[in-house]
Structures are given as C-alpha cells and as structure tokens.
Image (cartoon, helix red, strand yellow):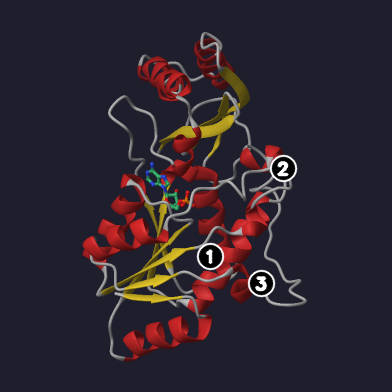
Amino acid sequence: MIISGSIKETRNQVKEWKKQGLSVGLVPTMGYLHEGHKSLIERARKENDKVCVSIFVNPMQFGPNEDLDSYPRDLERDSKICEEAGVDLIFHPEVEEMYGPNFCGFVDMHTLPEKLCGASRPVHFRGVQTVVSKLFHIMPADRAYFGQKDAQQLAIIRRMVIDLDFDIEIIGCPIIREEDGLAKSSRNTYLSAEERAQAVILNQSLEEAMKAIEAGEKDAAKIKSIITDKLNTCPLAKIDYVEVVSFDTIQPIEKVEGAVLIAIAVYIGSTRLIDNRILM
Ligand code: AMP
C-alpha cells in the first residue's frame, strides 16, 4: 500500500493505473476510520481494480468556532485498517499541499447547500465541494464512494458532478450503525458515557417517523412534529434542525412522495450529530 502526501506523486500513480487499463475507486474521508468508512472501502474494493482512500481533515469545510483542532486523527491506526481492507493508496496531504500560498479558488452552488446543515454551517459545503473537486482532479477515479449518512453532501456531490461534467460515477452507500442504532461517526468519540447513552434518540425519533409513514402518514409537518416530540423527551438533546425535504432539491416539501430526505441535526451536550432516512 502506497501512502503519499504528494499531489504530483498520487496523480502520477493513478494515471499510471489508468494507462494500464485498471479501474480506480476513490473513498474520500477525514480519517479516524470506523465501520462506516470501511463499508465504503469494501464496496470500492469489490467494484474496482485499485482503491484510493484520501485522509484529509479539510480546514475549508470547518467554520471558525467548529472542531477543526480537536477533530480526531490517527494515521497509524487508519493505515492499518486500510491495509487490512486491501486499499492500494492512501492520499494524506498536509494542508499546505492542498492549499498553497495565495490559494483563492473555490467551488460552490446555489440552493442545494443553503438549507439543513448549510444553514447552521454556512461555509461547510463550499469547503466540501472545493476539496472533493480537487480530489477528483488529483485522483481521476472511475467511481467515488460517499455515505448516505451525509445525505445533503451526497446530493450536492451528485449535482456538482452533473453540473460541472466530472467524468466520475458517484456511488451512495447505506448508513452503518452501532448495535443500538446510533449512526457511526468519528464525532461519537466526543460523547461522554451519559451522552452516548442518550444519543440513540436520533435514530429512535426517525424510527417513529418511519412507523407513521408506513401507517400511511404523508403530511411532512406531522412527521416533523413526531420527530421533534420524541427528541424533546431527551434531556441532553437540543435540536438544530428537523426537516423533510426533496432529496433531489433539498427544498422543503409538504407531502411525503417521490425521493424524500428526512434529516435531523441534534446537539447531544456540545456534540452535534446528524442522522436521516431517505425514501425513494
Ligand atoms: P468523514 O470522514 O466523516 O468525512 O466521512 C467520509 C465518508 O464516510 C463520507 O462519505 C461519509 O458519508 C461516510 N460515512 C461516515 N459515517 C458513515 C456511516 N456511519 N455509514 C456510512 N458511511 C459513513
């Protein structure tokens, strides 16, 4: 397994594989890998001759008061996980390699990034689109793998690839959860034992919404209030947002029909967690 922090070296390696007629899958991550990341890597492993994983805590997608400095990092552990999963190349650049002197370019779009996480994290998706565009140029893969855990991100990247004609297939992969239903996340490490126990409320509230939908409920406002009421039973939970939107446009809808994203962001103590359900 190659571990490289160099854009030039990484690009040359991927180009060489492409020249040999090999297919390449890319899994972009911020590291501190868990089963969620592993599921993307495994899928990429199955569908491609070569698998690249990027590990980069991207400063551009963090707001001024967010957790950039405290975000967990452990390259040694991540490398072991990647090696065992059959990864061929880890791209692990320093910030200076990605954002050189006088850097001032960025990629952005209207509407899709404005609601949900974009409303509470105004610079976040601009940073995501910029770094993902750079990664797609550095590693011109055939396929890139993203988790549905970050559903708005997945919708934005899909749109970006269409709108800006990137020659890459975007594969969305299901959310991997802990046994009690909490979606796996590198940020779960911030939770105290008490917070961790209460964090299951996110998945439980979405389960209640799904039960109502299965029983025939179509009114988005009702579904939102089912989720909100459940979340409000948890003393440590503070709601950032509960939204029912079109998965294609990320705009609010009144009736649950077509491709629908039910998305929530909730502070458990000071840790902000997200979860969702996608109905197709
Ligand atoms: P991150 O390192 O948090 O930026 O995540 C890298 C990729 O892993 C993103 O595409 C995430 O959506 C995906 N991911 C993170 N957590 C999970 C999970 N629990 N299940 C599936 N995919 C995940």
Query: 65 or 48, which is in the foreground?
Result: 65
From this view, report whether residue 82 is shown above or below residue 7: above
First along the sequence among labels 3 and 2? 2
The circle drawn on residue 38 is none
For the point 51% across and 12% down, the residue is: 234
First along the sequence among labels 1 and 3? 3
Query: Is the CB of the residue bearing disc 2 within 8 angstroms of ligand 1?
Result: no
Q: Is residue 243 left or right of residue 38?
A: right
Label 1 or label 3, whichever lies nearer to me, is 3
Residue under label 3? 99
Task: Say what amino acid the circle numbered 1 marks.
Answer: Val
Task: Determine if residue 165 is in view.
Answer: no
First along the sequence among labels 2 and 1? 2
Asked if the residue at tag 3 contacts the one at tag 1, i.e. Cβ–Cβ closer than 8 Å, the answer is no
Query: Is the CB of the residue bearing disc 1 within 8 angstroms of ligand 1?
Result: no
Q: Is residue 92 left or right of residue 25?
A: right
Residue under label 2? 65
Q: Percent x, y for residue 87? A: 29, 68
Q: CA distance from mark 3 to mark 2?
A: 20 Å
Residue under label 1? 161
Q: Secondary structure at mark 2?
A: loop
Q: Percent x, y for residue 145? A: 39, 59
Task: Say what amino acid the circle numbered 2 marks.
Answer: Asn
Query: 161 or 178, which is in the foreground?
Result: 178
